[in-house]
Image: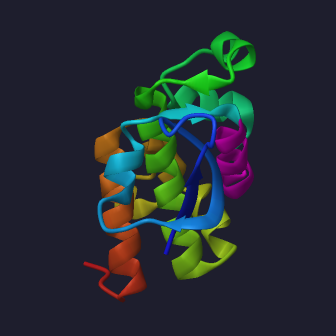
């Protein structure tokens, strides 16, 4: 289960992961329509252990924009939440070994490292599907 809070300053900013608000079935859908704070992005960086310079290549902003701003538009929110979902799902299923799996070439993915699929929504869906299949022992 995932937990989030929305900033007290504005109900339109996803501010920090917290145990304050439990997401319902469409929680990511609702959060993706809001702006996201740099604080939240930093928390996701901690969870994913992806270096900032690599993470910036995955989301629709430049490093300069990231450094300059503290609040980002919903297109950034959506991408950050997608990446977070992959890591939280994988870590819940496989523990810390998931980090190694994300950084290792995978024959099922045509020799690519799973984290290379984080660059677009189709790759993210493929990763979530693959994690679910592996978690349930479905290898084919």
Q: Nearer the viewer, residue 69 or 10?
A: 10
* Majority secondary structure of magenta residues: helix
Q: Which residue is at 44% across, 52% downward?
A: 111
Residue 52's spot in the image, x, y percent? 72, 33
Can residue 100 be seen here? The reply is yes
Residue 116's spot in the image, x, y percent? 49, 43
Answer whether residue 32 is magenta in the image.
no
Which range of residues does the magenta coloring cover? 39-49
Q: Nearer the viewer, residue 113 or 73?
A: 73
**Is 51 on the left-hand or right-hand side of 121?**
right
Colouring mode (rainbow / by chain / secondary structure / one colour): rainbow
> Does residue 104 lie above or below 38 as drawn?
below
Q: Nearer the viewer, residue 83 or 71?
A: 71
Q: Nearer the viewer, residue 75 or 108?
A: 75
Residue 130's spot in the image, x, y percent? 35, 68
Answer whether residue 44 is magenta in the image.
yes
> Does residue 21 lie above or below 61 as drawn?
below
Q: Which residue is at 37% across, 58% downward?
A: 27
**Which quarter of the figure is the C terminus placed in?**
bottom left
Q: Which residue is at 36% across, 68% downward?
A: 24
Check the image and name the residue furthest to the bottom: 137
Can residue 112 be seen here? The reply is no
Q: Which residue is at 36% across, 89% downward?
A: 137
Residue 15's spot in the image, x, y percent? 62, 43
> Does residue 61 lie above or below 86 as drawn?
above
């Amino acid at each position: 289960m995932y937990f989030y809070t929305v900033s007290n300053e504005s109900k339109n900013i996803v501010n920090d992961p917290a145990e304050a608000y439990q997401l319902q079935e469409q929680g990511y859908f609702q959060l993706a329509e809001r702006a996201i704070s740099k604080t939240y992005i930093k928390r996701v960086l901690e969870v994913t252990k992806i270096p900032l310079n690599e993470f910036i290549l995955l989301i629709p902003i430049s490093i300069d924009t990231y450094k300059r701003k503290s609040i980002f538009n919903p297109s950034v929110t959506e991408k950050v939440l997608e990446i977070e979902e992959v890591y939280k799902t994988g870590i819940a299923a496989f523990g810390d070994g998931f980090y190694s799996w994300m950084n290792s070439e995978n024959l099922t993915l045509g020799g690519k490292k799973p984290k290379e699929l984080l660059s677009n929504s189709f790759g993210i869906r493929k990763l979530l599907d693959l994690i679910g299949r592996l978690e349930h022992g479905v290898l084919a």
